[in-house]
Image (tube, rainbow, N blue to C red):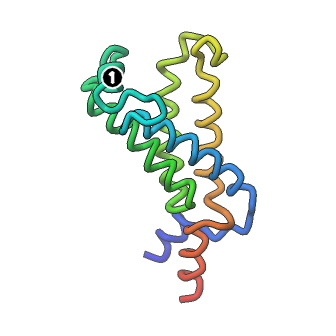
Amino acid sequence: MSNLMNKLIPASNSWAPLFIRLPLGIILMAHGSQKLFGWFGGYGLEGTGQWMASVGFEPGYLMALLAGSAEFFGGLALFVGLLTRPAAVITAFTMLVAMTVHIGNGLFVSNNGYEFALMLLATSVSLAVSGAGQLSIDKTIAKKFTQQ
């Protein structure tokens, strides 16, 4: 168990991941809450599910639930630094799928392109590689495992 925990929650002393985790977590939670709850001008599960079905992600409601949950709960986990590596892998995969919707529109977000999803993918991958860093629940947990 200790070996698994050391891989999932390494004890990094870097502050850099904190400055990626906080804005990424906020952005992902906001987008996930649009899909799940209809907050911030979103369409909720029903509306998002209909849209997802219209672009080929079937069943739409389930896809909306999965994407919204990955974004909201993954973003929350990243924000607090809890199981950062697995949460980052999940959000990276979600952004990779999101890019498939926008890829035909080119790079720029002004044309409904994939640049925003690409940036979220890149920051998620960065956290999957680096781990949570300082001021994280992962760091607190890692300290407890190294003290045993």
Residue at 65%, 56% (x, y): give it: 130
In this figure, what is the number of numbered marks? Answer: 1
User: According to the image, label 1 marks what residue?
Assistant: 57
Q: Is residue 132 shown left or right of residue 41?
A: right
Q: Name the one closer to the observer, 64 or 147.
A: 64
For this view, does 48 lie left or right of residue 24?
Answer: left
Counting from the top left corner in percent of width and height, residue 83 is at 50, 61
Against 71, residue 52 (above or below) is above
Identify the residue at image location x=60%, y=36%: 120
Left or right: where does residue 60 sit relative to residue 122?
Answer: left
Image location of residue 19, percent across then percent down: 71, 52
Residue 105 sits above or below residue 115 on the image: above
Residue 113 drawn above or below residue 126: above
Q: On the image, which quarter does residue 45 sit in?
A: top left
Residue at horizontal 44 percent and vertical 39 percent from the top: 32
Residue at the extreme bottom of the image, as rendered: 148
Q: Could you say where residue 112 lies in the image, as x and y percent from the top left?
A: 57, 15
Quadrant that contains the N terminus: bottom left
**Nearest the eye: 136 or 128:** 136
